[in-house]
Image (cartoon, rainbow, N blue to C red):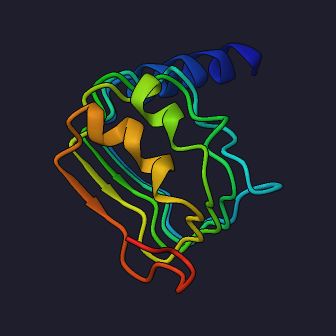
Amino acid sequence: GRLDCAILLASWDRLWKKVTELVLDNCHSVNGEIEGLNDTFKELEFLSMVNVALTSLAGLPSLSKLRKLELSDNIISGGLEVLAEKCPNLTYLNLSGNKIKDLSTVEALVSKDVICIKLALLPKHIVI
C-alpha cells in the first residue's frame, strides 16, 4: 500500500544522503542540462558525467564535499565559474573532449586552487 511506498521512499532518501561516489556516464542529459541531481547528495566526493551531452553546468547543485569531477566528452563551452561557487573543495576536473572556447573560463577554477584540470583536445583556434 501507500505506507510501504512512503517507507521505501524514506529509506531511499536516507541512502542518497550517504552516497559519496556517483557515476552517470553515458546517461544523456535533457536539453544539455543537469537534471535530477540536487542538494540531497551532500556527501558526494566523486561525480562522473562523461558523455552525457552536457552543454551547461547551470543546474549543478551545491556539492561542498565534491573533490573530483569528470566531465569529459560533453559539449560544454563555458560557464565553469559556477564550479568555483558550488564545489569549493574541487581538486580535480576533467574537461577533455569538450568545446571550451576560451581559457579565461577556467580562470575562476585556477584561483580556487583546483590542482588538476585536464583540457585535452582543445580546439585549434585557442591560443595558449
Whether residue 45 can be seen here: no
As rendered, which of 43 and 10 lies closer to the eye? 43
Q: Give the side of residue 128 with respect to residue 110, left or right.
A: right
Point out the image quarter for the C terminus. Answer: bottom left
Determine the residue located farthest toward the left in the rendered image: 115
Residue 47, x across and y down, in percent: 38, 48
Q: Quadrant of residue 3?
A: top right
Point out the image quarter for the N terminus. Answer: top right
Q: Give the side of residue 100 with respect to residue 106, left or right.
A: right
As rendered, which of 106 and 93 lies closer to the eye? 106
Image position of 13 with respect to 79: above or below: above
Residue 56, x across and y down, in percent: 67, 49
Q: Give the residue drawn at x 42%, y 19%.
A: 14
Residue 69, x across and y down, in percent: 35, 50
Q: Give the side of residue 110 with respect to residue 1, left or right.
A: left
Residue 95, x across and y down, in percent: 42, 64
Q: Give the residue drawn at x 46%, y 60%.
A: 71
As rendered, which of 73 and 128 lies closer to the eye? 128
